[in-house]
Image: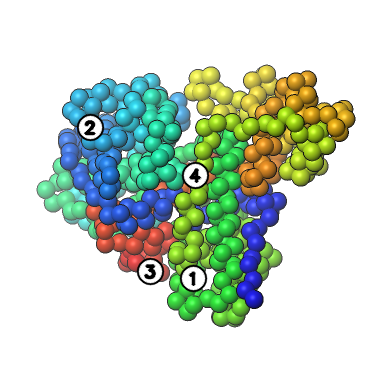
Amino acid sequence: MARVVERRNPDVVMRLDRMGSFHQCRLSFMRTLLRRMKNEAWSFERPRFDIDADGVGTALYTATTPDRTYTLVAFAHDLPDDMRSDRVIATAWDATFTLHDGVPTADDVERLRANVPLQEAGRVSGSELTLSRANRSQRLWNSVVESLAAGQQPDRELIESVGYLMRTTAVYGSGKFGAADRESIADRPELLAPFQAEMLTVFLIRAFVLDLVEHMASVSSPNAVPLDPALRRRFGIGNSTGLGMAPFLITHPKLINNWIVAREEALARVRSVEHAAGDDVAMFRSIVRRARTLVDLWNSDHEIQVAKLTALRTDLDVLDAYLAVEALDGSYPWDALVTWTSEALSIEGQELVVSMVLEPYGSLVDELTDSMHADESAPAAIDGTCSITEVRRSIASSYDWALDVDWSAEAANARAWYVSEEKLEPRLGERFHEPIADYEQPLQPGRDAARMYNDLHEWEGHQTLGAFLREHPEHRHTARRLAVLQDAPYAEVRDNTIDAEMLPIDLLRAKLSFFGATHFDPRSDRWVRINMFRGAPFPHELAHADPDAWTYPPDEAANGSLV
């Protein structure tokens, strides 16, 4: 009788050290987008590229689905070097963008020209889905322009060490600064999966950036050459992401549950495969070899990530030794492999294997992307008739980890989340050294659940939650969260989000891995640089390329193969 492997326990998966070791996988949103583009035969055009010799001007890139068209409106600027900054307080950028719903008119472009370069200081409309900006990686940018202008290809080693010509510092959507609300576009099949408008924006930005660098070389010299296509694909789009993104995993519990459930269900399905076909084993072994190249090209100066990369390289050696002995031809080989990793590899290595074993099984797992969205437009309903006994039992089940924390200890309460008045974005401060406690946001669900649990002990078991909340309205948000958790076992991060040792970069990496990001490079414990779409086909190549083969470099990185 066939054996069905269960999903991993949320107590294992939803710990910050593991979430901070997630890798991209087949269910990541970039890959979801590219598969849809390929399967639906989207078409792409560049109807306008009015960029002058100084690199200033306007460009339009269209993506046409079976039902509608989206247009990236790009504005290129001549930015002085001393104004180039990744910080959120920046007021000028090398390029600014918006994704327009449809084909913009001339009036639309002029309206956007007056607002998009201002970013937060400007306003877009419901006809725009995203707002973004990017800065050059100046050293690599200049090197590429100079090489191409001289009729030569740029230095591959330098390209691989950086990986992008521009990095975005924000890709805003979901109603920010006047853009369309998520609810107004969520019923479109191509935008149903999470963050598809944002991923499309970055995909088209990448095409613009590579066109722009070739343009700048061509205006510098009549002898300029375009980038070799294989080398061109080695450029992604960088991104700098900070604390503004971190609370998302806490404020969207139902959505995060659906992401993790899909990933854990995909893993469980693969682990339940009784016998691996020869082609699937061969593909997995190829992915392992290519992962070695991916890790070798992954650079970071941050001590935490340096240590993780050192362990990951050792993990790959250990994995190679395992695969040299294990032919993966026994019963339930993937379950045996994943079980072995839990003892043999670091958490970083374990989670890389989780991603890699999914690769041969697209037909088994890709459909799960259809379940990764969530309707969070209405708050969860509180059942006020629940007895105090039932509520205590629910907290003890969902927050057992939090009830074990000594919340009277200063270290357990060392931080506080608040919103910056200047930028209206989340920030994390030191509770006992900054006057921020009065502005604290409810982003510490474990502590709040423990406080509610303690207050519940002053009530009789037969009394109702409704009566309790009338006396203690400060616990209403926790009661709503408990209602979500009843059907969402992976909704909650099972760690203290205000602890003195908590690393916000773990929250950032978990979310960015679902985007499909690679080459995580923390710049502190609060912000990280990543690469997006590195190795992916460009719009004009997608019709003849594998939409999934790009995520791990080819066995020989120099050949640039897309298959």
- As rendered, which of 219 and 257 lies closer to the eye? 257
Outermost residue toward the front in this view = 385
Where residue 204 sits in the image (x, y, percent)?
A: 30, 44
Q: Do the residues labelled 2 and 3 touch (CB within 8 Å)?
A: no
Label 4, on which residue? Answer: 373
Neighbour class for label 1 at 10 Å: few (<14), some, many (≥20)? some
Name the spot of residue 184 as percent of width and height, x first.
40, 32
| SS for callout 4 | loop
Q: Is mark 2 on a helix, strand or loop?
A: loop
Residue at (37% x, 42% y) in the render: 188
Q: Which of marks 2 and 4 is nearer the N terminus?
A: 2
Residue at the image point whose x is 41% and y is 50% from the top: 30
Is tag 2's residue or tag 3's residue first in the polypeptide sequence? 2
Kind of residue sitting beneath label 2: Pro
User: In the image, is 75 to the left or to the right of 456?
Assistant: left
- Quadrant for residue 399, please give it: top right
Earlier-in-chain disc, 1 versus 3:
1
**1 or 3: mark nearer the eye:** 1
Tag in front: 4 or 3: 4
| Mark 1 lies on residue | 284
- Give the number of the disc on residue 104: 2
Q: Which amino acid does label 1 sit on?
A: Phe
Which of discs 2 and 1 lies nearer the camera? The answer is 2
Residue type (three-letter) at the residue carrying disc 3 = Glu
Q: Quadrant of the C terminus?
A: bottom left
Pair 2/3: label in front: 2
Q: Distance between the residues labelled 2 and 3?
A: 42 Å
Give the residue number, with chain letter if any, for mark 3.
556
Q: Position of residue 359 (x, y in %)?
A: 47, 64
The residue drawn where x is 83% and y is 29% is: 463
